[in-house]
Amino acid sequence: MSDIGSGDEGISSQKYHGQGMDAGGNNFDSGQQPQEQELATKMLQIQSKRFYLDVKQNRRGRFIKVAEIGADGRRSQIFLAMSTAAEFRDHLSSFSDFYSSLGPPNPESVPDDGKLKSEMMLKDNRRYYLDLKENSRGRFLRVSQTITRGGPRSQVALPAQGMIEFRDALTDLLDDFGTDDGGFKGELPEGRHLRVDNKNFYFDIGQNNRGIYMKVSEVVPSLQVKSNFRTAITVPEKCWTRFRDILADYCDKMNRAHAEPADHHQPGAAPPAARAASAQPARDTNAPVASLCPQEAFSGSAPRI
């Protein structure tokens, strides 16, 4: 189970309206998936910032979206699976205890990077970096969310004085909805390998924040760069059956095509063109290509995981 859906779900509730766009220029009122459901929400006012903790659910399971809105209207957000939110809640307790043990701020004793304490959480293809920092405005906990293989970084900054209040609000939501992420929990099939002439094909099953997928990789030796050249496509799980049917249909057509030369010499055999026309079903020329895989297009590159 991955932490969230596609990562582009917008903040759509009226509580966010009128706040414009976030620091990165993302419109939080767009891209909402209709199948996403908001189950509960909490709002915290900590110093000059507002924080919204939204429990949401979609076809991949439940997660908590944490949105920070600064005094200037800027927004940022991170997404936590329910199990990750529980781990974060426990870290908040330890960070709060450490913060309480600190004396008054002393500019001469602060590290160059400002970090006083750091932790890291790992969930599927996401990393979360927790850094208690100090600068001229005070002490705060910065929570950064990154994708393990590149991608944008998002983060929220929680004033240190509000860590206990934030932890208690998070605990209330976890008590109500549990720490079960939902979604697929079975064991994924092992990868397969196929060699044809000088080519190697690899079939790997994986899971990321968009769901389960199959990555089909082709590895071809390249004399120009003295190394192997790899290309890949990803096929979402919901398209596997249709993908298989299309390949099976092409296999049947090619089997009939290979059998035609032998039939051509039999007395009374129909011409090849006539047999080919009768063997193929009627085709709707108005059918859109996207109907092969509704609401999902095949990617021409490896998945972002």
Image (cartoon, rainbow, N blue to C red):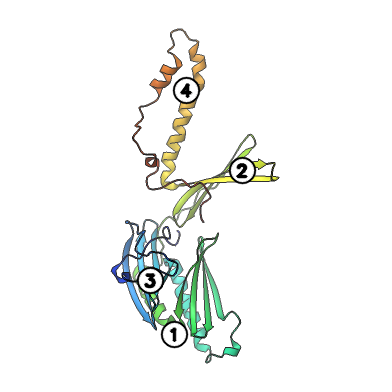
Q: Amino acid at mark 3?
A: Leu
Say whether marks 4 and 1 touch (CB < 8 Å).
no
Q: Circle 4 sits on which residue? A: 256
Residue nearer the viewer, 81 or 197: 197
- The CA distance from mark 4 to mark 1 is 74 Å
Q: Secondary structure at mark 3?
A: helix
* Residue plotted at (36% across, 30% down): 283
Which tag, 4 or 2, sits closer to the chain's start? 2
Closest to the camera, between mark 3 and mark 1, is 1
How many other residues sit within 10 Å of disc 4, few (<14), some (14-19) or many (≥20)? some
The disc labelled 4 sits on which kind of residue?
A: Arg
Which mark is on residue 196?
none
Estimate the spatial distance between the alpha carbons at disc 3 and disc 4, rounded to whole Å: 60 Å
Q: Quadrant of the N terminus?
A: bottom left
Q: Earlier in the sequence, mark 4 or mark 1?
A: 1
| Residue 174 circle label | 3
Task: Say what secondary structure mark 4 lies in.
Answer: helix
Label 2 or label 3, whichever lies nearer to me, is 2
Amino acid on which the number 2 mark rests in the picture: Val
Given the current orientation, which residue lies at the most extreme bottom position? Answer: 104
Q: In 3D space, how far apart are the residues under numbered discs 4 and 2 (Cα atoms)?
A: 30 Å
Specify the quadrant of the image occupied by residue 45.
bottom left
**Cα distance between the residues tagged 2 and 3:** 46 Å
User: Is 144 or 165 nearer to us in this picture?
Assistant: 144
- Mark seen at residue 161: 1
Cα distance between the residues tagged 2 and 1: 54 Å
Query: Of the residues under marks 3 and 4, which one precedes in the sequence?
Result: 3
Kind of residue at badge 1: Gln
At horizontal 48% and vertical 47% (from top left) the residue drawn is: 299
On the image, numbered disc 2 is attached to which residue?
219
Q: Which residue is situated farthest in the left direction here?
A: 14
